[in-house]
Image: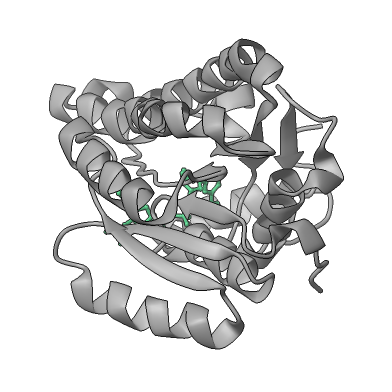
C-alpha cells in the first residue's frame, strides 16, 4: 500500500545510502510520487547508480540525480552538493539513511570500528545536513528525516557503538528542530525495529528468532513500510510535526 502526497511532486529530496535496503525503497517511493530524487551512492557503485537512475525515472520521478560521496567525508559531500545546487537550486528534503552496524561484544570491539560506526551513522548525518543548511534557508517546506533505530532508544547487547550512534542522532534531531524551526525547517527521526534488509540478513538465525519472539505484531517490518513513513514526514501532511521521534517496530519497544 502506498499513500500519495501531492506536494512531493517536483520536491528535491536527497537520500543517503540509497543503493540498497531501506534507502532504495525510500527513493523508489519518492520517485513514484513524482519527486526529483537525489540519491547518494559511494565510489565504486557507478553501475548500480546508473541502473537506479533508470529505475527511478521509469517509476515516475520528475528527475533522478546520483551524487557520489561517502557520508563520512566532508569534502566529498560539499563538492557534490555545491555542484548539484548550482545546477538545480536548493534541496528541500533530506533523508539521512546511510548507516552501518558491526555487531560484537564490547571486549572485541576495535577502536577503528567504533570510529567508522560513529563517523558513518552520526557525523555523516550532521555533515550532510550542514552542507545543505544554507540552501535550506532559501528553500520552502524543508523536512529532514534521520533514520535512527529502536536500539538508540532501548540499547542492545553487542551493539554499543551502533546504539550510541543512533541515540546521538536523536539529540541531533531535536537540536536541529529547535535551531531551524523559525526558518520553517522541520527535523524528525524514525526508529525502525527489525526491518528485513541486507543489514538484518547478516544476523544469525537464532538472533532473528529471538527478535521475532519479542515483536507483538509477530513479523519483521518491510523497507516499504519505512518508506511510507518517511514520505509522510517529508510531505506537508506532517507540517506541524518537528523534533519528534517515531518508532516503526511492530511494537518491539513498547
Ligand atoms: P543496508 O541494507 O546495509 O544499506 C546501507 C546503505 O548505506 C547502503 O546503500 C550503503 O551503501 C550505504 N552506506 C553505508 N556506509 C556509507 C557511507 N559511508 N557513505 C554512503 N553510503 C553508505 O542497511 P539498511 O538495513 O537498509 O539500513 C538503512 C538505515 O536504517 C541504516 O541507517 C540503519 O542503521 C537503519 N536501520 C535499519 C534497520 C533494519 O532492521 N534493517 C533497523 C533500524 C535502523 P553501499 O551499497 O555502498 O554499502
Q: Which residue is depicted at the point 37% across and 34% down?
A: 128
The quadrant holding residue 129 is top left
Residue in the image at 67% along x and 50% along y = 230
Q: Is residue 129 left or right of residue 152?
A: left
Q: Residue drawn 25% across and 25% down?
A: 114
Question: What is the x, y in percent for residue 35?
Answer: 61, 65
Q: Is residue 13 above or below residue 28?
A: above
Q: What residue do we see at 53% from left, 53% from top?
A: 13
Location of residue 225 by image quarter: bottom right
How many marks on residues?
Answer: 0
Pinpoint residue 15: horizontal percent, then vertical percent.
47, 52
Q: Is residue 7 left or right of residue 55?
A: right
In the image, residue 111 sits, relative to residue 74, either above or below, namely: above
Q: Position of residue 162 (x, y in %)?
A: 41, 31
- Closer-to-camera residue (114/56): 56
Frontmost residue, 213 versus 219: 219
Residue 194, visible in the rendered structure: yes
The image shows residue 116, relative to residue 24, as above or below, that is above
Q: Is residue 159 visible?
A: no
Q: Which of the colour schemes (rainbow, by chain, secondary structure, one colour) is used?
A: one colour
Q: Quadrant of the C terminus?
A: top right
x, y percentage for residue 98?
40, 47
Q: Quadrant of the N terminus?
A: bottom right
> Is 22 above or below relative to 58?
above
Amino acid at each position: 500500500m502506498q499513500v500519495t502526497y501531492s506536494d512531493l511532486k517536483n520536491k528535491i529530496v536527497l537520500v543517503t545510502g540509497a543503493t540498497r535496503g531501506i534507502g532504495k525503497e525510500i527513493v523508489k517511493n519518492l520517485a513514484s510520487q513524482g519527486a526529483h530524487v537525489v540519491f547518494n551512492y559511494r565510489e565504486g557503485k557507478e553501475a548500480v547508480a546508473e541502473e537506479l537512475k533508470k529505475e527511478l525515472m521509469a517509476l515516475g520521478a520528475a528527475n533522478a540525480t546520483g551524487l557520489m560521496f561517502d557520508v563520512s567525508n566532508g569534502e566529498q559531500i560539499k563538492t557534490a552538493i555545491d555542484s548539484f545546487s548550482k545546477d538545480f537550486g536548493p534541496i528541500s528534503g533530506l533523508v539521512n539513511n546511510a548507516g552501518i552496524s558491526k555487531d560484537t561484544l564490547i571486549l572485541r570491539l576495535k577502536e577503528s570500528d567504533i570510529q567508522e560506526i560513529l563517523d558513518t551513522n552520526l557525523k555523516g548525518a550532521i555533515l550532510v545536513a550542514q552542507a545543505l543548511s544554507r540552501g535550506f534557508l532559501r528553500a520552502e517546506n524543508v523536512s529532514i528525516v534521520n533514520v535512527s533505530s529502536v536500539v538508540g532508544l532501548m540499547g542492545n547487547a553487542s551493539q554499543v557503538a551502533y546504539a550510541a550512534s543512533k541515540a546521538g542522532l536523536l539529540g541531533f534531531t531535536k537540536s536541529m528542530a529547535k535551531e531551524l524551526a523559525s526558518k520553517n525547517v522541520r527535523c524528525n527521526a524514525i526508529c525502525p525495529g527489525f526491518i528485513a534488509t541486507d543489514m538484518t540478513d547478516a544476523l544469525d538465525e537464532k538472533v532473528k528468532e529471538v527478535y521475532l519472539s519479542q515483536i507483538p505484531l509477530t513479523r519483521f517490518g518491510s523497507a516499504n513500510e519505512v518508506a511510507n513513513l518517511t514520505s509522510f514526514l517529508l510531505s506537508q501532511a506532517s507540517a506541524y510535526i518537528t523534533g519528534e521521534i517515531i518508532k516503526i517496530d511492530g511494537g518491539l519497544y513498547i
